[in-house]
Amino acid sequence: MKINTAEFIVSNSDAAKCPAERIPEYAFIGRSNVGKSSLINMLTGRNHLAKTSAKPGKTQLINHFKINANWFLVDLPGYGYAKVSKSTKATFQKFITDYFEKREQLVCGFVLIDIRHEAQKIDLEFMAYMGESEIPFCIIFTKADKISKTKIDSHIAAYRKAMRANNWEDMPPYFVTSSLEATGRDAVLSYIDDLNEDIFKNANEF
Ligand code: GTP
Ligand code: MG
């Protein structure tokens, strides 16, 4: 997919105030600092569209970006930055769960996972929440440039195993990306493009 236009539309802390427009929407979620905003810049080819930072907690609001004038990419704040008790089940910021539960235009959530690390409890809990809420999601492994090519496969295999141990039949569709090297750009964009095409064909039902 060619990105002709990518424009920032609005930031919100209230899911109910997000744009009303019924166009397909895709949201990036994951722990703070995992690379959500960088991935939006990499996919759109605009280095400064979404604000990034080496310090966790940069994105604090729900940010809508309109792509090619007919679909939205959404940059969300990270979870796991605000203090979460290690012993209890994680709770996610209410405006984030509101967003996922209320946003009818959302076609797919992308849960970003840093490919360097073992499966983290908070990510598994977030994916369990997505499953229980019946919200379709994919996994995007980020920062692939930080490990060797040979390690990528073994880390993915370990992640699949962790998901199976957490009652998933299998991993959802997944992508391996590096925002630094633009790895995975075509794969993610064609996945979105295919979903959009189906939606635009059956526009009356969307
Ligand atoms: P919050 O908004 O705080 O939740 O973070 P975020 O998930 O949006 O992360 P962000 O895109 O701001 O990136 C965090 C840090 O990771 C920055 O220093 C980025 O430069 C770095 N980073 C992001 N993606 C990659 C990547 O693919 N490779 C490398 N090497 N660094 C990356
Ligand atoms: Mg961010």
Image: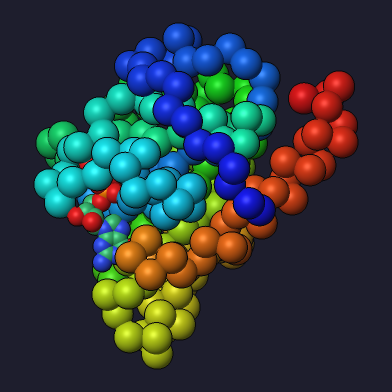
- The reply, left or right, for residue 150 in relation to residue 189 is left
The residue that appears at 45% across and 74% down in the rendered structure is 156
Instruction: Using the rendered image of the protein, determine whether residue 67 is visible from the camera's viewpoint.
Output: yes
Instruction: Using the rendered image of the protein, determine whether residue 91 is visible from the camera's viewpoint.
Output: no
Residue 204: give x, y in percent of width and height.
86, 22
- Number of callouts in the render? 0
Residue 5 figure quarter? top right
Seen from the viewer's position, the closer of residues 104 and 165 is: 104
- The reply, left or right, for residue 179 in relation to residue 201 is left
Rendered-image quadrant of the C terminus: top right
Q: Is residue 94 above or below residue 168?
A: above
Residue 55: give x, y in percent of width and height.
12, 47
The residue that appears at 59% across and 63% down in the rendered structure is 186
Seen from the viewer's position, the closer of residues 63 and 171 is: 63
Residue 36: give x, y in percent of width and height.
36, 47
Residue 153 figure quarter? bottom left
Looking at the image, the residue that sits furthest to the front is: 4
The residue that appears at 41% across and 19% down in the rendered structure is 10
The residue that appears at 47% across and 78% down in the rendered structure is 157
Residue 137: give x, y in percent of width and height.
56, 46
Residue 155 figure quarter? bottom left
- The reply, left or right, for residue 33 in relation to residue 145 is left
Q: Is residue 167 above or below residue 102?
A: below
Q: Is residue 177 above or below residue 85?
A: below
- The reply, left or right, for residue 180 in relation to residue 135 is left
